Image (cartoon, helix red, strand yellow):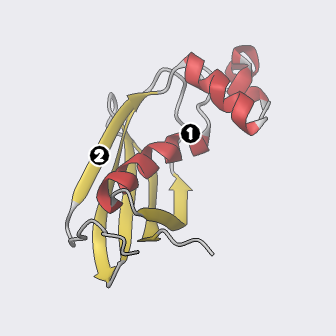
Amino acid sequence: MTIEHSPLAVGAKASFRKTMTVAEQAMFTGISGNLGGLYVDAVRAKAAGAEAMVAFELATAALATTCLSRLGGPTRRVAETNLRFVAPVLVGDSIEASAEIITVDGDIARCRLSGRNTASGEVILEGEAVLVPFARG
């Protein structure tokens, strides 16, 4: 069986924009089991100095994986990530994540990741990821 891979091109970009909602925060709490006060308790978050509950960092990172999926196509997966969460995201903030292919070596692509708060323009996430062909076994 031959698997056709989407072409990879240095400079190819993808972006994805989403508002981090209370409903999604609740779903991610269920998935992750994280009951940290900053994430699930508005009173605790405000006591810590936040204006609202803090969105899960890995939920914001998931926006970047949407971009990676668009760049890599249906036959590639994320093999590696290196992320820095530069600034907190509050529930209710709108975030735009982006990914750009910076190198291609055969079927493997290294990508630059970023995310920003669309209202303030503040960078909230930076990093890199590697896309590889899906292989099992």
| Circle 2: element type | strand
Between 8 and 37, the one lying in front of the other is 8
- Mark 1 / mark 2, whichever is N-terminal: 2
Q: Residue at x 48, y 68 (%)?
A: 134
Q: Residue at x 56, y 39 (%)?
A: 59
Q: Do we see residue 26 in this rendering?
A: yes
Quadrant for the C terminus, please. Answer: bottom right
Q: Circles 1 and 2: CB distance less than 8 Å? A: no
Percent of width and height locating residue 38: 71, 29
| Circle 1: element type | helix
- Residue 63 picture quarter: top left
- What amino acid is labelled 1 in the image? Ala
Residue that carries the numbered disc 1 in the rendered image: 59
Above/below status of 74 relative to 131: above
Between marks 1 and 2, how big is the CA–CA gap?
A: 15 Å
Q: Residue at x 37, y 42 (%)?
A: 116
Residue that carries the numbered disc 2 in the rendered image: 15
Q: Residues within 10 Å of mark 2 (few under 14, many from 20)?
A: many
Above/below status of 109 relative to 84: below
Q: Which mark is residue 25?
A: none
Q: Left or right? Give the position of 16 relative to 132.
A: left
